[in-house]
Amino acid sequence: MKALELKNVTLKFGGLIAINNLSISIEKNMVFSLVGPNGAGKTSVFNVLSRFNDISSGDILLDGFSIKGLQAHQLAELGLARTFQNIELFGNATVLENLLVACHSRKKTNSLSELLFLPKVRAQEIEYREVVEQVIDLLELQPYREKRPSELPYGIRKVVELARALSLQPSILLMDEPGSGLAVEEKQNLAFWIQDIREVLGITILLIEHDLNIVREVSDTVAVLSGGELIWSGQPSDLDKDPRVVEAFIGK
């Protein structure tokens, strides 16, 4: 079974076609990258996957089940998480608190159980703390755990944003321009972490990224969009061999 499938997906805003009859299929435990020029439809793909926009036609399958009609908050319960270009963190909470808040968004206990602090609530709290500590160790955030994101450099805040998404314990992670605004060394660390997220945590990754060095290093498959349409899909090593790709994206 595929981790994620888009089947003939079209997204229209009035007379504007943001996504045109797009079909892609993503295997479990792979890194699949979407690239293309600005306005190609990449973020629109993430927005329909996140249920921010309703598709005009087609279907989206998560682990074989259609997510059409679901609410955005229900996707976390199904194992889908997303990072954002604009960092979505609580600036006045510590890094640790931000990650624990993400964990609690998937809580399985009710308010009465929490009020009485029943054994299953205590067990859940221990589980959340273990998840967060694993994420902090993986992304090397130990020096920043008690600091507020508002006190941290931009590059570290981007890592915390990634940690927030991982704290949701997703099976599929949508990463929206994680390399944007990062220094060269930070991008190298990002590529290393993406590989670890896939190999250590077993998470399937759908990546939007303009930096083709990162794309080539971490991707199993790359799809190129232009004008809301898929114009090429293949191995990252072949990315610059297709004249359509060079004309639409690489050559610009």
Image: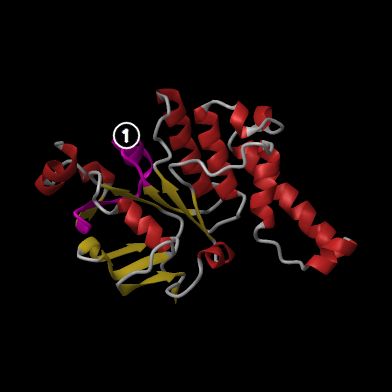
**Residue depicted at 51% across the width and 69% down the height:** 71
**Which quarter shows the N terminus?**
bottom left
From where the camera sits, is residue 118 visible? no
Q: Is residue 140 left or right of residue 226?
A: right
Let me know if residue 203 is in the magenta part.
Answer: no
Horizontal and vertical percent position of residue 204: 46, 55
What are the residue bounds of the magenta stretch?
208-230
**Residue depicted at 84% across the width and 68% down the height:** 112
Q: Is residue 22 left or right of residue 84?
A: left
Viewer-side residue, 202 vs 211: 211
Viewer-side residue, 17 vs 25: 17
**View extreme (front): residue:** 14
Q: Please say if 108 is above or below 199.
A: below
Q: Residues within 10 Å of mark 1 (few under 14, many from 20)?
A: few
Q: Is residue 142 left or right of residue 198?
A: right
Tell me where residue 109 sits by quadrant. bottom right
Viewer-side residue, 186 vs 90: 90
Question: As shown in the figure, which amino acid type bears the numbered disc 1?
Answer: Asn
**Residue depicted at 64% across the width and 51% down the height:** 102
Determine whether the residue tagged by mark 1 lies in a helix, strand or loop: helix
From where the camera sits, is residue 137 visible? yes
Horizontal and vertical percent position of residue 212: 29, 37
**Residue depicted at 61% across the width and 33% down the height:** 149
Question: What is the total number of numbered labels drawn onto the structure image?
Answer: 1
**Which quarter shows the C terminus?**
top left
Q: Please say if 205 is above or below 58.
A: above
| Disc 1 target residue | 213
Q: Is residue 157 left or right of residue 43?
A: right
